[in-house]
């Protein structure tokens, strides 16, 4: 099975297509892990933190303005990590929000597919609590612009997104 087929299976799924795994020792660093009911080789795990004190200016739109925890949503196929998506817990750990991308006006953009995906993750994280259509309010509170761009991108991003400018690496002796 190729990566696009795995991602498509995840993207067309709904909350009821996933089964919680409970306390699986392999996923102890995550806040939750589920398996796709109609393809047990696909797992989704979220909440493995890569930064404890993450802050963006749009956090100020939420009741709890304190820094969030930046974490991953990881997609596994036959127990192997095949895709990694960064997100952040905001508003006192209440919501799982995508990081999106900055447009030329300095606004954060997220695609409608990305919103749908994180609505699913957010609902799975709450063990079915809440209703996913209310998740659009979270996106509005953040001040995000929702686009029709394709998501997830064709090329997976496996590292934490860089913040600020990186120094250009120079080869020694050149």
Image (cartoon, rainbow, N blue to C red):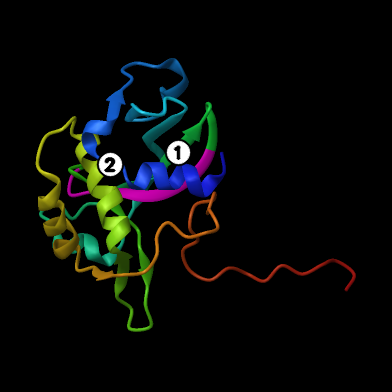
Q: Which residue is mark 2?
A: 121
Q: Is residue 4 magenta?
A: no
The crowd level at tag 2 (other Cα within 10 Å; few <14, some 14-19, many 20+) is many
Q: For residue 32, which quarter of the picture? A: top left
Q: Secondary structure at mark 2?
A: helix
Q: Is residue 103 above or below residue 99?
A: below
Left or right of 151, for residue 58:
left
Tell me the chief SS of the magenta region.
strand
Q: Which residue is mark 1?
A: 75
The mark that comes first in sequence, 2 or 1, is: 1
The crowd level at tag 1 (other Cα within 10 Å; few <14, some 14-19, many 20+) is many
Left or right of 32, for residue 172:
right
Q: Nearer the viewer, residue 59 or 130?
A: 130
Q: Residue at x 28, y 49 (%)?
A: 118
Q: Residue at x 32, y 30 (%)?
A: 31
Look at the image and tell me in which quarter the C terminus lies.
bottom right
Q: Nearer the viewer, residue 87 or 1?
A: 1
Q: Position of residue 132 (x, y in %)?
A: 15, 46
Res. 96 visible in picture:
no
Res. 155 visible in picture:
yes
Q: Which residues are magenta?
A: 82-92
Left or right of 112, for residue 86:
right
Labels 2 & 1 near each other (Cβ < 8 A):
no
Q: Secondary structure at mark 1?
A: strand
The answer for how far apart the CA atoms under marks 2 and 1 are is: 12 Å
């Amino acid at each position: 099975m190729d990566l696009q087929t795995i991602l498509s299976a995840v993207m067309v799924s709904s909350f009821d297509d996933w089964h919680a795994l409970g306390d699986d020792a392999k996923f102890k660093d995550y806040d939750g892990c589920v398996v796709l009911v109609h393809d047990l080789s696909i797992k989704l795990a979220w909440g493995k933190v890569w930064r404890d004190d993450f802050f963006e200016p749009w956090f100020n739109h939420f009741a709890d303005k304190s820094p969030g925890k930046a974490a991953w949503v990881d997609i596994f196929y036959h127990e192997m990590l095949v895709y990694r998506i960064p997100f952040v817990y905001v508003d006192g750990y209440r919501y799982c929000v995508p990081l999106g991308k900055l447009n030329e006006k300095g606004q954060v953009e997220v695609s409608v597919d990305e919103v749908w995906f994180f609505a699913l993750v957010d609902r799975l994280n709450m063990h079915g609590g809440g209703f996913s259509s209310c998740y659009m309010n979270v996106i509005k509170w953040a001040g995000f612009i929702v686009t029709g761009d394709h998501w997830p991108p064709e090329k997976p991003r496996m590292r934490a997104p860089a913040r600020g400018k990186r120094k250009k690496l120079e080869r020694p002796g050149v």
